[in-house]
Each structure stands twice: as structure tokens, then as C-alpha cells.
Amino acid sequence: MHFELNEEQKEIKRAAREFCEKELTPELALEFDEKEEFPMELYKKAAKLGFTSMRIPQEYGGQGYGLLGDCIVVEEMCRVDPGIGVALSLGNLMIPDILLRRGTEEQKKKYIPPLARGDIISAAAFSEPEHGSDITRMDTTAAKSGNEWIINGSKEFITNAPIADVFIILCQTAPDAKPSHRGQSLLLVEKGTPGLEVTKLKGKMGIRPCITGSLSLSDVKVSEINIVGELNKGFYYALELFDGTRVTVAAQAVGMAQGALERALRYAKERKQFGSPIIQFQGVSFKLAEMATKIEAARLLAYKAAWLHDQRGEADPMATAMAKAYTGRVAMEVTDAAIQVYGGYGYLADYHVERFHRCAKITEIYEGTTEIQNLTILRYLMKQT
Ligand SMILES: Cc1cc2nc3c(=O)[nH]c(=O)nc-3n(C[C@H](O)[C@H](O)[C@H](O)COP(=O)(O)OP(=O)(O)OC[C@H]3O[C@@H](n4cnc5c(N)ncnc54)[C@H](O)[C@@H]3O)c2cc1C
């Protein structure tokens, strides 16, 4: 692996940076953080320029730059604003990735190009009120009746749910399967299907422009062609999926940390106390040096996981888990240190770094908590000994 981006990747980074710095203004960031709404207009603009479909192959309307290309853009988005950045990075989450690996040609053609263009929004529903880290059993069931599946149950914490046009839902299709995870399948459900109700969740700590909702499914009927891949393989497909998508979360974390560092560095050069800029005090300057070092290490782990994914055509679960766990912690530590550099002003919304800290926390929680990443790392460590 080269430890420097190539010319094409540097150009992607430059273009993404230019777009984000122009469009994700501080005013917009504060406005969307407060109103907890998805920045749809901006999303469509970003999609039109290809920034939301970097990882999607050109054949399906994307840019074909792989996961590393996606990470470079996501990092820039979250560097400029962690809330809007996350929202933009997750508008077409997971459905293209899973369909590319497991979907029929018909499913790919129907859903991936409009998702790549930003014409529609997707959501992926695994978590339930009683099943978060442990999705080995789902209370949401899908029962076969003729050539339809009838879905009943509920899902919690679903990104994009209130604005999604299409959902992919993990259901228990064989309730008596032992172990239970061998009886799960993934089904596509479109917005407006009778029996599907969405409730918007409000009051999140951070990433407030990336909206979240709960699903209630009551006798939701879908055709048998809506099943993705093989029947009863859904759990395995979910694990395979997360091994790739978690790398994007690592890129979100790196971007948030980088944005906070740059703000803190600027402020430390400007702010004077005891007659000199506070960067002259070693208590401040060493903090900045440590922040930069941690970010560099985190970035390398994230890029390595993305690069391995792109080279092999499938993720390296241990590299992904290490990247996600480490970058999330670094994002929390660096954004916290940035607030400290700002002193009292860091505690105020108008100075922005508190928002970076609030947003960073999600990277240690969604798409598998840090503890769950550690379990994966350990599982692979055990295999090595
Ligand atoms: C803003 C947001 C967006 C989300 N988006 C989505 C989405 O789009 N789709 C979706 O399906 N889900 C989504 N989620 C859900 C998210 O993936 C879960 O919250 C997460 O997986 C943890 O599940 P839980 O909240 O039920 O916590 P729990 O599983 O109840 O865990 C509670 C604590 O126990 C720890 N723990 C659990 N098991 C173990 C273990 N074996 N060993 C050690 N520690 C353990 C956890 O690490 C955690 O610290 C989202 C969540 C949030 C907050």
C-alpha cells in the first residue's frame, strides 16, 4: 500500500474540499443542527456532482472510485461539517452495497442508478427495540403467503427512515431455525406500502441533519421478488455488508477530528492570553501536536481498511473493525481537546467545535459499537494464535 494518495485521489480530495467549503457554510450547519432536517437540496447538488456515489460502479450510475474514493470525500464532508457531512454521506446508505453483492440484475437496475443520482433515498433496518448489538434473532417476521411475504414488527433508530423511498429490512423468515440467525432474510420494501409507518425521532445528541426514525410494520405485503439474495441468508449478508460500510463511518470520524483540529489550531494562533498567542504555551501546543498525530494514525487505519476492500473485492473484517474502533475514539478525544483549546468559547454553539464533539460520539455507536468491533478484532486474533 502506498502511504500517499495518488494524483487522481488528490484531485478527488481537492474537488470535494472545494465543494464542501463553498456549500456547507457555518450558518447552514447551525441552522440544520437546530432544525434537525435533512439538507435535501444540498444532497441533490452533491449527488449531481457525483460526491455521493463515489463507491458505486459507473455501470450503475456511480463514479467507480471504490471505497477509498468514497472515504476521501466523506472525510472532507465531515471535516467541514460533521452533521451535514454525515447526512450527505448516508443518503444512499447500504442498499447499493448489498444489491451489488447479492441483488438480482433487475433489483440493481431498479434501485442503484436512482440512488446514485440522488433521486431517491435509502434506509437499512436491522436494529429493533430489543435487538441492537445482537441481531442474531429478529422479532420482525416475514411469513410467506402465496407469492408474497407478509411482514410484521418494528425497527428502531433507522437512518433516513422519515425520508426514505426504499428500505431494506432484516426479518426472521424461519422463526424456528436453530440457531435463529440461520432463519433471517433481507427484504426490500418501498415507501407507501400499506402497513408501513414511520415516526421521526427527535432530540439526538449530534448528527442532527441526518435524520432517524422508527418503523412499524403491520401486515406489510411485498412480492417474493423483493427478497435479496438467498432465503435465510440475511444475517450473513448483513455481517458482510457492515464489514464494508463501517469503513465509511471510520472516514466520518477522521473528517470530524480533522475539522476540529484545524479550528483549534487557527484559534490557538489568534487567541492571546498573558500577552502571547495561546499556541506559545506548551500545554496548548503539545495538545495540538498529539491531536494531529492521532488523526494521522486513524486516517491510515481507515485508508488501509478501504484499500484492502478495494483490492480484494471484499472487506478485511479485522482491518475494518480496528479502523472503526480506533477512529471513533480518536474523534472523541480530538474533538474534546479542541473544546479545551477554545476554553469557554468552545462551549458555545457559535464557535462550532462543541458540535463536532456531539457528532463524533455516534461513530462509536452506530454500525456496531466499539465493544462489538473489539469482539471482531479478538475473534481474528484468536484465529492467529
Ligand atoms: C443515530 C443513530 C442512527 C442509527 N442508524 C441505524 C440504521 O440506519 N439502521 C439500523 O439498523 N440501526 C441503526 N442504529 C442502531 C445502532 O446500530 C445501534 O444503536 C447499535 O448497534 C447498538 O445497539 P443498541 O443501541 O441496542 O445497544 P445495545 O446492543 O443494547 O448495547 C448497549 C451497550 O452494551 C454493549 N454491549 C452489547 N453487547 C455486548 C457484548 N457482547 N460485549 C460487550 N459489550 C456489549 C454495547 O457495546 C453498548 O455499550 C442507529 C443508531 C443511532 C443512535
Image: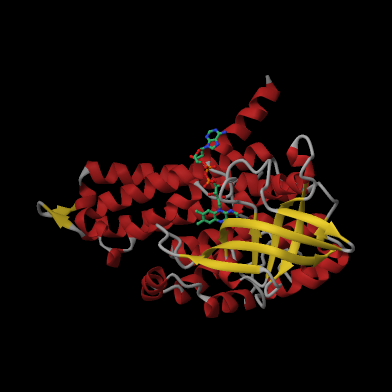
**Is residue 7 visible to the viewer in this orientation of the structure?**
no
**Residue 254, image x and y in percent?**
49, 51
Foreground pick, 332 / 313: 332
Residue sticking out furthest to the left: 274
**Residue 205, image x and y in percent?**
40, 57
Quarter of the figure that contains the C terminus: top right
What residue lies at 60% left-to-right and 62% top-to-bottom?
A: 215
Quarter of the figure that contains the N terminus: top right
**Residue 74, image x and y in percent?**
56, 61
Q: Is residue 379 left or right of residue 236?
A: left
Q: Is residue 334 left or right of residue 158?
A: left
**Residue 207, image x and y in percent?**
45, 61
Foreground pick, 150 / 29: 150
Q: Is residue 169 left or right of residue 91?
A: right
Which quarter of the picture shows residue 196? bottom right
What residue lies at 80% left-to-right and 55% top-to-bottom?
A: 143
